[in-house]
Image (cartoon, rainbow, N blue to C red):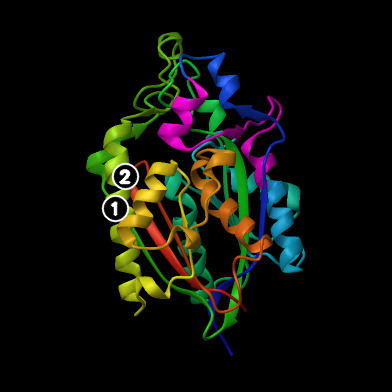
Amino acid sequence: MKTRTGIIGTGSFLPSKVLTNDDLEKMVDTSDEWIKTRTGILERRIADKDTASSDLGLEAAKKALDEAKIGPREIDLIVCATATPDMFFPSTACLIQRELGTTHAFAFDISAACSGFVYAIEVANQFIKSGKCEKALVIGVETISRITDYQDRNTCILFGDGAGAVVLAPVSEEKGILGSHLASDGREAGLIKIPAGGSRLPATCQTVQEGLHCLKMKGNEVFKLAIRLMSWVVHQVLEECGLRINDVDLLIPHQANMRIITALASRLRIPIEKVAINVDKYGNTSAATCPIALDEAVREGRIKDGDIVVLVAMGSGLTWGANVIRWGR
């Protein structure tokens, strides 16, 4: 009997171009040692000028469909989490839908920044549980390099581009998504933002010259909140599922910064061996970090049937949330 929603396929895609710490040394006042010490990042991937978020998302989606062993026509819903859409509208989800040929499905984007994929998982889960659809494609994709100020040494060292995707479908009662907890606090909206380009501050020559279309972040405040809020929400969602920290087989946190990840693991008292980490290779890919890390963990054999997997993220909004999944079909 199929009573829960589970992940039946994963996929990810990274651009081939690598931006190393040595490369950044030539662009901004920084050093490889400073970046490694502060962030744990060694390199990140950058999309070429002709590649948009929908292109990366499409490739990740194809891999997820292949792994799920289903065709595009079997997908009823596409939810794309992104803070860097191809354009304001149409949605990136619709652009990916066009290329996949899933014209019978309905598709839309979610804007929750780095928390977007965690949010999107639960949104798709609710559509499947309600009976509105049977199979959903959930994508997290970013081309953060497009909104990065490469003269700001505090932010340009952090971000990279990439995409991850999963296919959700009904699974057996004892498997699948056991619970999710989502939260937000708009009072902290100013901590991570792109000031210009929307209806509040439309694009002008002045906003472009002042770099107001690039990401701005108050890093120290975000650092402290990320650890506190992500640890809180993990405890909260596990309690709601009747589980404890010791039940977690793999924690997949938002890959923002190695110091945040290690501090989070320490606060949760989870051995670092039970934490998925790839921030050193890809940097912070925002909504794409969790699905990329999940796909890598699956392909490396780190997740076994019956394992408890927890996804957790925090991002602009502020938004934060976590999903608990018992792996398998």
Q: Quadrant of residue 239?
A: bottom left
Between 80 and 219, the one nearer to me in the picture:
219
- Residue annotated with mark 2: 318
Question: What residue do we see at 56% from left, 28% from top?
Answer: 145
**Of label 1 and label 2, which has the lower sequence position?**
1
Q: Is residue 266 left or right of residue 148?
A: left
Q: Quadrant of residue 233?
A: bottom left
Crowd class of label 2 (few under 14; some 14 to 19; many from 20; radius 10 Å): many
Q: Which residues are magenta?
A: 31-57
x%, y% of residue 136?
61, 64
| Residue 103 in sight in this render | no
Amino acid type indicated by mark 2? Leu
Between 146 and 243, the one nearer to me in the picture:
243
- Residue annotated with mark 1: 229
CB under 8 Å between callouts 1 and 2? yes
Determine if the magenta segment contains residue 49: yes
Which quarter of the rendered picture does the N terminus lie within?
A: bottom right
Between 201 and 44, the one nearer to me in the picture:
44
